[in-house]
Image (cartoon, coloured by chain):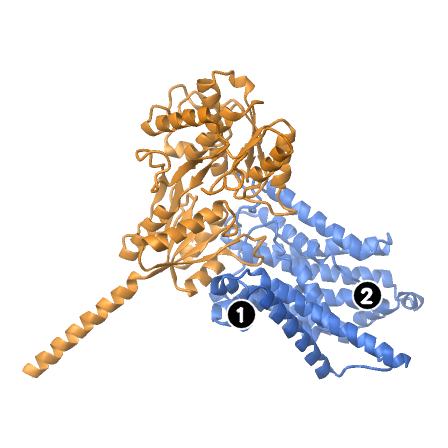
Amino acid sequence: MSAPGFRMAAPVRLVAVAAFAVAATLIILLLAGAPPLDAVSVILDGGVGSRIRALQSLGVWTPLMLCSAGLLLTFAAGLWNIGIEGQVVMGAIAATCLLRFFGEGAGTFPLVLGLLAGMAGGALWAWLSGALRVYGRVHEIFSGLGLNFVAIGLTLWLILGPWRQPGAASLSGTEPLPDDFWLPMPGGFPLWQTVLAAAAVIAVRIILTKSRWGLVVKASGQNASAAALWGLRPGLRALQAMAACGALAGLAGALQVTGLYHRLLPSISSGYGYTALLAVMMAGFKLGPVIPICFFFAILNVGSIQLPLGLRLDSSLAGVIQGVLALSVFVVAGLELRLRRRKGGA
Amino acid sequence: MFKRMLAMAVLAVAALGFAAACQAADKDLTFGMLLVGPYNDKGYSQAHYDGGLYAEKAVPGAKMIYLDKVNPADRPGFTIPQLVDDLASKGAKLIIANSDDMKDGVREAAKMHPELKFLHISGDDVLAGKAPENLANAFGKMIYGKMMAGFAAAMTTKTGKIGFLGPLVNDETRRLAAAAYLGARYAWVNVLKKDPKDLSFQVTWIGFWFNIPGVTSDPTQVANKFFDGGYDVVISSIDTPEAVTVAAQKKKAGKDVWAVPYDYEGACEGFEDVCLGVPYFNWGPTYEKFIKEVMDGSFKQTWEWNAPDWKSGDNAPDSAVGYAYGPALSGAAKTELHKFMKGLGDGSINLYVGPLNYQDGTPWLAAGEKADDKKIWYMGQLLEGMEGASSK
């Protein structure tokens, strides 16, 4: 992997990214008429300034982390799983669907089933995208995007149609689930979400670094034809990686339903699938940096609510900042590549 | 001994002074408002925002903080209880939530925060017996505003086809669509002396209070479809002003069309050619009252459904709802509308008297039966003669 020629040392790279990001962010905040330091401090304070806010940020971190962990598997297999957004949505639909079969007073057992159903729903949706790639030669970016739209369309149809609230037809969402199916949050702490996300991180780490399967997936991802010659069945590996990622994304969707909204909504995924893609790319497809980056994105998301409250600024600025940060990473990576080529060519 | 008494007296005075100072500080009240749309939407949310500004002025010591665009599409990952936490951490003691969409979240937040008071606009948790002690409901009797909108539309239409641009379907929106229809039918039959069969009243719902691209139907498209399909007046019942905007475009293109926007008193501004007037909410006085009650400790759980202030004439400043005449409304129609308002006000006109049937023909009110508030509030279907989904 170590190409000859120019290669920035990690700290230099970090400084370059940070400098670029800070400069771009400052320009944007100034253009938006926001006092930059105030805006940044308001966001940070809003994201981690109190126990409640830190817990809220942790609550946003968990679905982002689940999705990111899943994406590391598909990226290892050389796949661009853009369809992760739809996999989150399908997880939410599947979980809601299962829980609808149980009424009030059914205890917490269905909750566990609901989470499993969410994983199955996400896995199925991802498998579809993978199957289109492996058997139908449709690139997973296109099938993924298409399936995202289908999943969202299905949500809208369910909410306005068969699952609508009695006497109403509103895209506000379905009726809230019975209390039994609300994931317990002792003291506002997203305990189960955190446990599951942490488990996913550990599992993905073990899979990618310690298991034979991880090695085979990586080999298939880097050179499918060579992998095929070695009898490693790259098609099957791709499908397995997709399904595993979909399961994690689906779990994130199921947690959005059971842990946060307690119902199915049109925007149930909160766009976390796409955000996770951004986070993983920013992290250079490595697990280590993904963890803090996801937390940072979570802080941005939670803290952004303070922009209109504290400074009467539009909270979508936080989204712009997030995008600029990701772009900074790509720009620096691009620069690096250019410099490397020039030096290598000389 | 004397010294001790003096010392005690001084202490007592100091304590009293301190208590008084605390009370003065208590007189200040921050109220936090959750708005479903942008605070400057020239529609529903702006009417609330302006009401908050009014209350800030009317009640010394009252201070508003607000959060707008409170809906899952604009604020992904947030729930109402979380946003209430944020308002509370900024010192809000009274939370005003302005949308039906926030019903479940507000109830949950009210249970989590017994130390705060909550006012949920448009909700009926109190009526339905689901509300905790610290939660009240209030709404304006917009049914009358909508009757006037329907009346103005029927007086103006040349094709006899009125379009109703509806948000989502629930008790409130069915009730308001039906009220607009009743007003339109009254003008058509009792004033214009025309056959009710020649009046067409089509309701099209977009799925939410405003456009969410990719989620709801696009209200601009729905309004265009109405006008292109021969509906020459469109009554808007959504939070945002697409109906007048599209009507103005059609007018420029030479079509004879009109529209009635909704919610915000200034909604006709810029659309003088096509605007027949606007039924609006005036939240200021309601907010003033609740803020004062929270300040002096007399806040109680209530369900308020405030009628227009009929006695002080059209659009009294204290009226919870009103109808601002639009520049495009003809003089004759305006005279008739004014008469209609007077009739509603003095009780000589009551449109909620049977026989009235639901859309599917089942009776809603028997002949001579007058509907009470609860019956009107929980109207289960659109009325016979209206077209469009009832979502039973």
Query: Which of B3/A73 is in front?
Result: B3
Q: Taking A63 as reference, is B243 above or below it? A: above
Is residue A109 visible in the rendered structure shown here? no
Q: Taking A23 as reference, is A159 above or below it? A: above
Q: Which residue is mark 2?
A: A78
| Amino acid type, residue under disc 1 in the picture | Pro
- Where residue A140 sits, quadrant-wise, is bottom right
Query: Which of A324/A303 is in front?
Result: A324
The x, y position of residue B369, in whole percent, is 38, 23
Indicate which disc residue A35 carries: 1
The N terminus of chain B, quarter of image: bottom left
Furthest residue toward left: B2
The x, y position of residue B193, in whole percent, is 47, 16
Left or right of B136, for residue B20: left
Q: Which chain is blue?
A: A
Q: CA distance from mark 1 to mark 2?
A: 42 Å
Indicate which disc residue B323 carries: none
Is residue A253 visible in the rendered structure shown here? yes
Colour that chain B carries in the picture? orange
Left or right of A81, for residue B98: left
N-terminal of the pair, mark 1 or mark 2, is 1
SS label for mark 1? loop
| Amino acid type, residue under disc 2 in the picture | Gly
SS label for mark 2? loop
